[in-house]
Image (cartoon, rainbow, N blue to C red):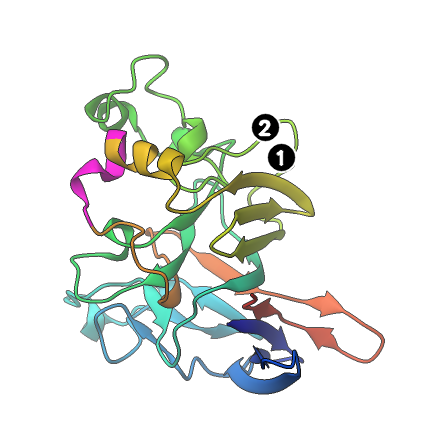
Amino acid sequence: MNRIALLCIPFLLITSFHTSKKNATSNQWIQLFDGKSLEGWRAYNGKALPPGWGVVNGEMTFSTKMILEKDYDYKGSRDIIYGAQEFDNFELVVEWKIPPGGNSGIFYHIAEGYRGIPEVAPEYQLIDDEHYTDFHDITAYNKSIGVVVDPHKLQPLQSTGADYAMYPPDATQKATRPAGEWNETRIIFTEKEVQHWLNGKLIVRFTPWSADWVAKKSSGKWGLSPDYGKFKKGYIGFQDHGSSLWFRNFKKNKTSTTFRIHTKT
């Protein structure tokens, strides 16, 4: 089994911890993001980065202001994946920021060849919980998926930190910082348990592929998406949902600033 740690010093690195039969551990570091380029990242189902993504002030950024006129007719996915390596069990730590009304997500175990990432990959939801509906009318959409009570409101399964449309965050533990401020997400995935953390608090935990998981998938939004969540290994990616986005992952230690994501047994 692998344990992968993503560290940025001040660039983004990933390390695999391979455990032998004698429990010996070896580390192999892979640079994912150097704060200067998005080498290794590309569009979902694509070969190059989609318009709008870049690096600004050392941060991975999406902005419509970076889309050039020549790219207005771009038809591919604007979601991006780290296409150089797939991951199975992992721990991912990343800081993110969205504007008022913003919406995005972090996907994992992504498989390509589908119309879009959401129909196949689990998502840690990122959204402006407080003001999203001030900018977007979601009433018709919520009614279409069976929401009866307050369909004009963002639902728990749609809120920040949720395993989108599967497991809602624990509202008693959740402390989301407002749009325009940095939040820290931590995702831990093993076949025994998945954990979603937000700003140091555990807000979601579940067992993947359990009877409960299968029941939620079958009865909910993903009931007509047979391949949703079935892959045990895949790419990690970020979603463009039309708003500006900023990603970074800075952890202070004695000698450096670290950007971290790792996989684990």
Q: Which residue: 46% across, 35% down?
A: 159
**Residue 165 appears in the picture as rendered:** no
Q: Residue furthest front?
A: 21
Q: Residue furthest right?
A: 254
Q: Is residue 62 above or below residue 100?
A: below
* Residue that label 2 marks: 171
- Whether the magenta-drawn stretch holds residue 126 is answered as no
Which kind of residue does numbered mark 1 sit on? Lys
Q: Position of residue 115 (x, y in %)?
A: 16, 57
- Whether the magenta-drawn stretch holds residue 222 is answered as yes
Which kind of residue does numbered mark 2 sit on? Ala
**Residue 183 appears in the picture as rendered:** yes
Q: Which residue: 59% across, 72% down?
A: 5
Q: Secondary structure at mark 2?
A: loop
How many numbered marks, from 0 up? Answer: 2
Q: Which mark is residue 54?
A: none
Q: Secondary structure at mark 1?
A: loop
Of residues 70 and 80, the one drawn nearer to the viewer in this rendering: 80
Locate the C terminus by quadrant.
Answer: bottom right
| In the image: residue 205, left or right of residue 140 | right
Dot 2, crowdedness within 10 Å: few (<14), some or many (≥20)? few
Q: Position of residue 65 (x, y in %)?
A: 37, 64
* Residue that label 1 marks: 174
Q: Which residues are magenta?
A: 219-226
CB-based contact (under 8 Å), mark 1 and mark 2: yes
Specify the quadrant of the image occupied by residue 150.
top left
Q: Is residue 217 above or below residue 123?
A: above
Q: Which residue: 62% across, 77% down?
A: 8
Specify the quadrant of the image occupied by residue 256.
bottom right
Of residues 145 and 210, the one drawn nearer to the viewer in this rendering: 210
